[in-house]
Amino acid sequence: MTETVPHVKGTPTRGLAAATFGFFVGFMAVALIGPNGPTFKSTMGLTASQLGLLVAAPNLSGSLLRIPFGAWVDKTGGKKPFLILLGGATAGLFGLTAVLIADYPKHLTIGMYPLMVALAVLCGCGIATFSVGIPQTSYWYPHKKQGMALGLYAGLGNTAPGFVTLVLPFAVLALTLPGTYAAWLVFVAIGTVIYSFIALDAPFFQLSRRGLPREKSIEIAKGQGEELFPSGQLVQALKISARAWRNWALVAAYFTSFGGFLALTTWFPTYWNLFHGFNSRTAAVTTALSFTLLASLVRAAGGSVSDRIGGENAAIGAFALITVGALMMVSLSDTALDIAAAVVIGIGMGLANASVFKLVARYVPEAVGGAAGWVGGLGAFGGFVVPPILGSFVDVYGKNGYNLGFVTYILLGLVSVAIMAFLRARSKSVPVRA
């Protein structure tokens, strides 16, 4: 008698589409804060350092929560962790909307600053969805398509802040600032519901939830094309990945690339507005076109580039571009040349982000979720650390500090080039999976 094979729902394409949509929605919950930085600065009377902390606040939870939630995917699949994080982001956005409706502009003073920071931190749950979507996508795709799939996931998901930055000034003009936050709250809430209907975990997790033994689940899932399988334990996944020294090299590199992307996504609107004198709409459009959207689209294509030339090679070139762009920022103060420098940095960060995560599944295949948590979490922590540093340059050096702060990226870029060169030199000891 022929044994009946349990039915598995979904396809890799659907898994990728759901994870990308969920990450886009989560990032949308956060992306309102940075572009409104100049407004909050003037309304609340903030210093540059205080503003840097406010716009960076979502990246605190958005980075640290990636570690346990990314690892949790190895035990339960991605859908449940995704929904919890989207719920947290929705709650934070609801709080910010309520504060603005009640207090903006007359009562939105420096006394409200701690509450605003706390709510921004809660919104950061939306960014933490990134490390959930990475293993969620990885478990659906074979090794040879990892770069393409992860590049599309992260690149298209990362377009959220660029889209928000483009639309926000015009939305504020039409709806007012509180009205714009209310509209975004509705979008994020509806997006969370849509994700709950379309998301499906990879075959192994579907089969495990039906009570099938691990070995049987793996056997059937392999027949569905799945090649990666988790350790099954959250703590164990973190321990396994933490013991891999290459995991920590990727963390350091990702601190520069994705942490840098998050930091400049929130900082550039203020930079163009207060240093170059752009109005809020021009500053937003410049940020989106010269950096945020550009870096995201490059990341989408960068996965395929990494597949062809190798993640280490692509990353070395990418971090070199970041260093060159930062040198241009420090050395020049011409508007057109600074925009060109932002473009160079954006291309470098987009390619670097794709290249670094291309290497996660190769270097730590036995605990992809755990590694994604460490790399995505501690790497993204740069988005919280760097903006206050950039603000401190302004507090110390005045207006010239807006350019001098990019010394930070020169140093980060050079260190990351060295890290990736070292990984390339040692890459022969890691098997290349077909």
Image (spheres, grey):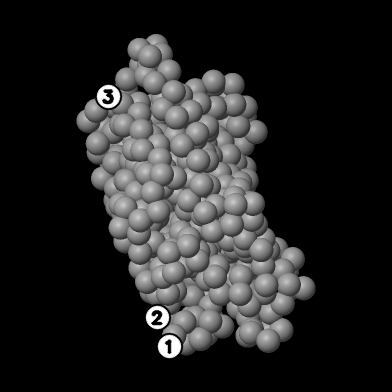
**Residue on which the image places disc 1:** 174
Left or right of residue 233, residue 115 in this image: right
Task: State how far apart marks 1 and 2 are (Cα).
Answer: 6 Å
Left or right: 326 in relation to 371: left
The numbered disc on residue 434 is 3
Nearer the viewer's eye, disc 3 or disc 2? 2
The image position of residue 276, as x and y in percent, is 43, 64
Q: Which residue lies furthest to the right in this view?
A: 111
Please rate how many residues cluster around mark 3, counting C-alpha atoms within 10 Å: few if below 14, some from 14 to 19, many from 20.
few
- The picture places residue 65, in percent across and down from the top left corner, at 62, 48
Mark 2: amino acid? Phe
User: Can you say whether 87 is above or below 311 in the image?
Assistant: below
**Badge 1, how many Cα within 10 Å: few under 14, some, many 20+?**
few
Q: Is residue 3 above or below residue 210?
A: above
> Which picture quadrant has residue 138?
top left
Secondary structure type for disc 1? helix
Asked if the residues shown at circle 1 and circle 2 are in contact, with their CB atoms under 8 angstroms apart, the answer is: yes
Other-residue count near label 2 (Cα within 10 Å), few / some / many at <14 / 14–19 / ≥20: some
Quadrant, the C terminus: top left
Disc with the residue nearer the chain's start (1 vs 3): 1
Give coordinates of residue 397: x percent, y percent: 60, 52
* Residue located at (38% from left, 49% from top): 332
State the mark number for residue 170. Answer: 2
Residue pictured at 41% horizontal, 44% vertical: 331
| Screen quadrant of the N terminus | top left
Disc 3 residue type (three-letter): Ala
Cα separation between marks 1 and 3 = 53 Å
Q: Which residue is depicted at the point 42% across and 74% down?
A: 279
For the residue pair 200 and 335, the one nearer the viewer reads as: 335
Q: Nearer the viewer, residue 399 or 290?
A: 399
